[in-house]
Amino acid sequence: MHPAGHWLLIIVVLLLPGVNLGLMTTQTHMARAPFFALLLGMLAVATAPPLILLADIPPFALAAWRLLCVALLLLPFVAGAIRRDLKKLSGRELTYLLASGVLYGVHFGLFNLAFAHTTKESVVVLLGAQPLMAAAVGALWLNEKITRVMLAASMLAIGGLLIFAWHDYTFDASNLVGDALVLACGLAIVLSYSAGRKLRPRMSLRGYLGALYLIGGATCLLSALIAGDALFGYARHQWSWLLAAILIPTLVGHSLFHYVVKYVPVFYVNLTILGEPILALLMMYLLRERFAVFRESSLTPLQIVGGLMLLVGVGIGLLSGRKPQLSEASV
């Protein structure tokens, strides 16, 4: 089987639970849907780092392809919803939508770019700031209370994150630019989700997703053209890995997070994302014999302890998230 075929099998595994989420209609199932969507989204998004490394495509070009292809895939199904939703939005809400899409594109571009300017250990450690940013933004802008459970889940997850990455972490002043990019892309996605939390009660899921991917993709395309990133001319295997990156972490993973943001505080969405680097590094370790790009991946007993701590913290966050509001816009 071609290497990309293994990832296509993963797509099927990931999509089937997503179909079940869409079929949930009873109140009990609706209450559970955000929990499973967060869990499934975390698993899908965790495939992004290994797929990005396998594709080996310039950062802004990679981001543009991922977002614009998802936008084009969804367009036949969401065009009508976009038109209807845009007519309902006020001028301020349209500004929120534009900002959410641009910030979403900025996140994708900066995250890819950060890997060229800092170490993967620095990326993992600095991702710990994301749920803290989300808690602060949620409290200041969305009136979301910071609870003891949120603090406990954060401390446990971030503690596990530090244990996982710290044995390989060394401070290097030359990495400060890349470190700043990681923090900037984390803040960008937090603000994008926060704007989405204000918009989702007013927009259908289809309308919001379609608009977000179009605006984010256009932002990344413009950035790619300015940066001079090549959009074509890649090898066949690069296109295969790019296709997997479009379908699994982007179409499945990020779409599920945008579905959930209507129902739970942005803190819980961003806390769940902390599981991404742990699961991604585990995948790279398991695939190290098959792919040269992962050959240096390692996994120590201390890292296993840290990873388990982080996942327990994420689990506490998942279980303590708010129950959904059942009166939502049409999807």
Image (tube, grey):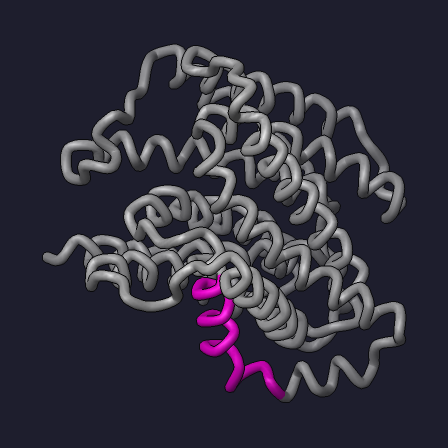
The quadrant in which the N terminus is found is bottom left
Residue 44 relative to residue 21: left or right: left
Residue 67 falls inside the magenta stretch: yes
Residue 109 lies in magenta, yes or no? no
Q: Position of residue 305 (x, y in %)?
A: 43, 15
Would residue 203 appear left or right of 233 to someone viewing this image?
right
Q: Residue at x 60, y 85 (%)?
A: 79
- Counting from the top left corner in percent of width and height, residue 260 is at 64, 55
Task: Label the magenta part by its dominant secondary structure.
Answer: helix
Measured as percent of width and height from the top left, residue 168 is found at 41, 15
The residue that appears at 51% across and 65% down in the rendered structure is: 225
Q: Is residue 282 left or right of residue 220?
A: left
Out of 197 and 308, give the one closest to the viewer: 197
Image position of 83 with respect to 179: above or below: below
Residue drawn at 72 percent across, 58 percent down? 262
Region rendered in magenta: 64-79
Residue 132 sits above or below residue 89 on the image: above
Question: Do we see residue 127 in this rendering?
Answer: no
Residue situated in front as seen by the camera: 162 or 30 = 162
The percent coordinates of residue 186 (x first, y second) are 64, 41
Q: Give the residue at x 21% y 53%.
A: 6
Residue 144: name its quadrant.
top right
Q: Quadrant of residue 199?
A: bottom right
